[in-house]
Amino acid sequence: MPWKNIYLSSLFVCIAILIYGTTFSYFTILKHYCFQSNGWDLGIYMQALYTTAFYGRPLEYTLEHESNPANSIFGIHFSPFLFFLAPLYRLFPFAETLLILQSFIIALGSLVAYRLSFFKLESRTASVVISLAYLLSIQLHQTNWFDFHLEAFIPVLVLLTYYYYVKKKFLLSYTFFLLALSTFEIMPVLLSPFGIYIIIRGLGKKKDIVYGFLIIATCAAWFIVATNTIYVFNPMRLSSYQNPWKKWGDSPVNIVLGILTDPIEAIRHIFTYHLEAKGFYILSLLLPLMFVPLYAPLEFILLTLPWMLMAFLSEVTVYYMLQYGSFLIGQLYITTIHGFSKIKKADPGLTLFKNYARNIFIASVLIFSMAGPFSLILLSNPDIYSAIYVGGFPVLNEHKELLRSILEMIPENASVLTQNDIVPHLANRLQIFSFTMPSVPPDYIVLDFRSKWVIQSMTVIRSKSTADIAWKFLKNYKYSPLVSADGILLFKLGKENPIIDLPHVFRFDYKNLYMDECGSIIFDATSESEKVVIFKPSNIPSILWYGPYVPLFPGNYEAVIRVKIKGVENKGFLLVEIVDSSGEGIIARKDVQSYELHESEWYEIKVDFSLSKPAKSVEVRGWVYLNTEEIILDYVELRSKHLFYSSYDG
């Protein structure tokens, strides 16, 4: 093959890597600016690297101090790989550093896949196709889109381990193997079959057999060290965190024994528990590659299958998505390359080989266009988009700009209690808390009631919501409200005068209210948004609308519902209920008699209500108890009148 063609194909792959890395760096940073990143796990890694790089406290973090009292990453994961990132974070201590690094590390795997493919297949076209399919992989996009995770480093490290093995550069291969092991304590389980594979493939080759046994022995020793290290740092690890394999046992050894002693139940679990999700997962892995990995059964069983079996035997469906796909992407592409090699050997004319290469390129592009993070299909369905890509697509607005400016008021290294989506913006400090109760009152409390995270708990660590934890401190300690505006609350411990104190106004319309079957959306120039919901009820009484299920801070509120009616036939009334759907039930209700409503004129129904503690899910329900031709809803608005900044205000 002419060297010029090799150079051009390599240059093409490098340009693709640059485009991928730049594009995803931009959008993941934009997500972060839009408060669509999370404390779990971007904030955790930021704080652990910050305390390591600036205070010499190895991988210390405080976000899970109740379930991990040692406040060390080693109490949760055995991830010494993080020490390699600390010097970089010392130079550039920003979330952007980790997000850019992640995007380019993921992209770099494409170059290794290209080099490995070219070495095995000696086909420039097939190698470029494999490298592009790698960059277009939905599993890698899910990893990259969701904060920062060490899983992002695994594919390239696994590929480099294998690449230098086939090149017979055992020392380099072993070095990258050790780096892969150092990411997570589970890696010895996933990589020990790699040693078995090397022994089988290297029968008759002494160096290969020795290297295979070295891999297995290292995995066994590493696993013992890793699990014991976690236990030493955090004996509560298995009891305080959700165990995805608790069905099989309460420890790694018991889990393995539980599966081996009841294989029939294990098979039943694989083929019955969330079967549709598992089927979609398998298709998302194999369809873009046109099932070529199945042409290499040995590689598929020993390299790709281990994580799939672990995921399928668990009770956690997120193992089929998010960042967890990175546990097998490197192995999958090694398997794909071997599958291509089998096809090439069985196809002297290379017709089938070329057809597969073409079809993989087409399938990868089509699936990326339909299910990638820039898919117009997904972007038109925000709920589905957010289910696949955590946080959704980044959208800036005035509220987020206001929140960013408010966070700048918090001094560096002051202790802070805040919610999951704000944590990464304040993580560079010694003490930050979110889902766990600080042992002493934090210097600052910051909440955003326009975000779902303010009232959500973290089931994996059996936590309470940030709002509930904050309310306990506000009731028992003297905090001053520095800022109260647009759903954002900033408190400081001690006596201070307010800096910003504005009413909180939440408006909801056809875009975020739920409607009965009798409702439809129409244009109305007299409405605030020029679109309204029109109801033509056929049954009396019937519910018209409900929602929007929003969190609210304790205080006195007024609900304003703007409606108009047409064609009232008899006496009756509209009923509005304010409900806390999280369990408190009906908070307030008001009925409006038909004679109070004028034909075809907008009318504001006002309902006062009060909350004595943070409400997790407030909704406004509208009922009709009168015969009418049409009822038109413009909007529902919730306005704060007086917030209870402490228990003494209520």
Image (cartoon, rainbow, N blue to C red):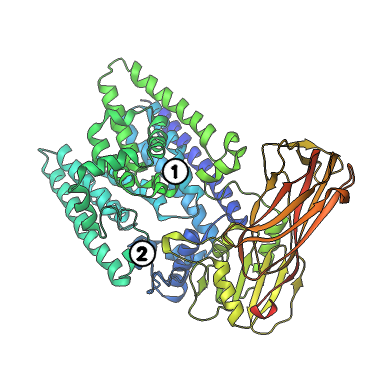
Q: Position of residue 245 (x, y in %)?
A: 31, 53
In the rendered view, tell whether residue 296 sits above or below residue 321: above
In the rendered view, tell whether residue 600 sits above or below residue 557: above
Q: Amino acid at mark 1?
A: Leu
Q: Position of residue 576 (x, y in %)?
A: 73, 53
At 17% from the left and 47% from the top, the residue drawn is 212
Residue with the mark numbered 2: 76
At 24% from the left and 59% from the top, the residue drawn is 223
At 79% from the left and 46% from the top, the residue drawn is 634
In what element is the residue under mark 1?
helix
In the rendered view, tell whether residue 312 sits above or below residue 69: above
Q: Position of residue 297 (x, y in %)?
A: 24, 32
Name the image quarter holding residue 520: top right
Apparent side of residue 571 relative to residue 58 in the rendered image (left or right): right
Apparent side of residue 103 relative to residue 511 in the rendered image (left or right): left
Q: Amino acid at mark 2?
A: Ile
Q: Is tag 1's residue or tag 2's residue first in the polypeptide sequence?
A: 2
In what element is the residue under mark 2?
loop
The numbered disc on residue 140 is: 1
Q: Quadrant of the N terminus?
A: top left
At 25% from the left and 51% from the top, the residue drawn is 189
